[in-house]
């Protein structure tokens, strides 16, 4: 075969490309289960962080997932009217992934599909809800924890795909920003349930926190995401929810 011919070059290139593609596909498939496990553990860690669990002694994916199993009471997927559309298996530590939240955000916006958003009810009396929306450069998401059956916030955790480090990225990286949520409430009687206020929330404002200095747009978009999802959770947050032990107590009584 003439190795200097155009035909040889084309055939050789095609063979190399095919081989590389096959190797990459094999590696991707081989690592898929591990990637899924990492994503699941990261999601669970963020939910637990929002709920203010002490994870200092919990190391590794397996330990994080086991800790979640031990402390979760029930996971409900609720509709906008507050009714339960489905439940997730706590024994398997089932949670909605970021991709799942994206689909639910689509439904919340009225673009198609049934709204079935998660409420994670822990045995210690804390319920965690999800948040998802568009940030400045990509999606932002997170979790807000409430005292069960109330609109009183006990903690929050947020993450992002590509917000600016040192600015918008502080929604994840700055504990002081997230700490502001603890002790606040949601006001469904007001103009918006919650507010991230540019220039600082007025003193005594119970449903607002200070925006991140220098990250006006990320703060604005996160605020929109929070309020869109809190509106969708309105009916669910305004009714008592079971932590998973209610049925057991009733049977014992």
Image: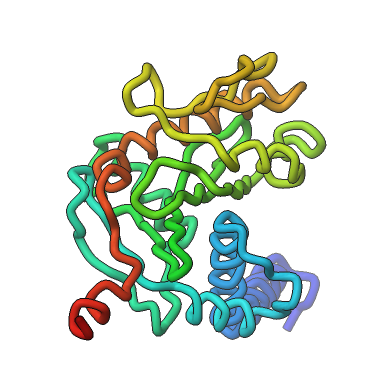
Q: Percent position (x, y) of residue 215?
A: 71, 25
The residue lying at 20 percent from left, 81 percent from top is: 253
Residue 175 appears left or right of 222:
right
Q: Percent position (x, y) of residue 58?
A: 70, 77
Can residue 18 be seen at all in this image of the molecule? no
Image quarter where the N terminus lies is bottom right
Q: Percent position (x, y) of residue 166?
A: 81, 36
Q: Is residue 105 above or below residue 253?
A: above
Residue 249 appears left or right of 191:
left
Q: Nearer the viewer, residue 201 or 97?
A: 201
Residue 175 appears left or right of 145:
right
The residue lying at 38 percent from left, 33 percent from top is: 228
Q: Percent position (x, y) of residue 243?
A: 35, 67
Q: Is residue 178 above or below residue 83?
A: above
The residue lying at 54 percent from left, 35 percent from top is: 184
The residue lying at 47 percent from left, 43 percent from top is: 132
Q: Quadrant of residue 62?
A: bottom right
């Amino acid at each position: 075969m003439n190795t200097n011919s155009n035909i040889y070059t084309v055939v050789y290139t095609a063979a190399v490309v095919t081989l590389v593609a096959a190797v990459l596909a094999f590696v991707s498939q081989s690592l898929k289960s591990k990637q899924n496990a990492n994503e699941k553990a990261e999601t669970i860690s963020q939910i637990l962080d929002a709920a203010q669990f002490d994870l200092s002694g919990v190391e590794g994916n397996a330990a994080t997932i086991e800790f979640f199993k031990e402390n979760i009471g029930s996971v409900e997927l609720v509709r906008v009217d507050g009714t339960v559309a489905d439940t997730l298996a706590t024994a398997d530590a089932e949670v909605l992934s970021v991709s799942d939240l994206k689909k639910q955000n689509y439904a919340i916006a009225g673009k198609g599909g049934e709204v079935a958003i998660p409420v994670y009810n822990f045995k210690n009396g804390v319920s965690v809800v999800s948040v998802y929306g568009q940030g400045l450069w990509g999606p932002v998401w997170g979790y807000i924890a409430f005292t069960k059956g109330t609109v009183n916030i006990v903690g929050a955790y947020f993450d992002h795909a590509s917000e600016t480090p040192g600015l918008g990225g502080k929604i994840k990286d700055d504990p002081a920003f997230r700490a502001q949520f603890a002790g606040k409430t949601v006001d469904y009687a007001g103009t918006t349930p919650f507010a991230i206020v540019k220039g600082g929330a007025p003193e005594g404002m119970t449903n607002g926190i200070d925006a991140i200095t220098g990250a006006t747009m990320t703060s604005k978009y996160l605020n929109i995401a929070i309020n869109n999802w809190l509106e969708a959770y309105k009916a669910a947050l305004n009714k008592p929810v079971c932590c998973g032990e209610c049925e057991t107590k009733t049977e014992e009584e």
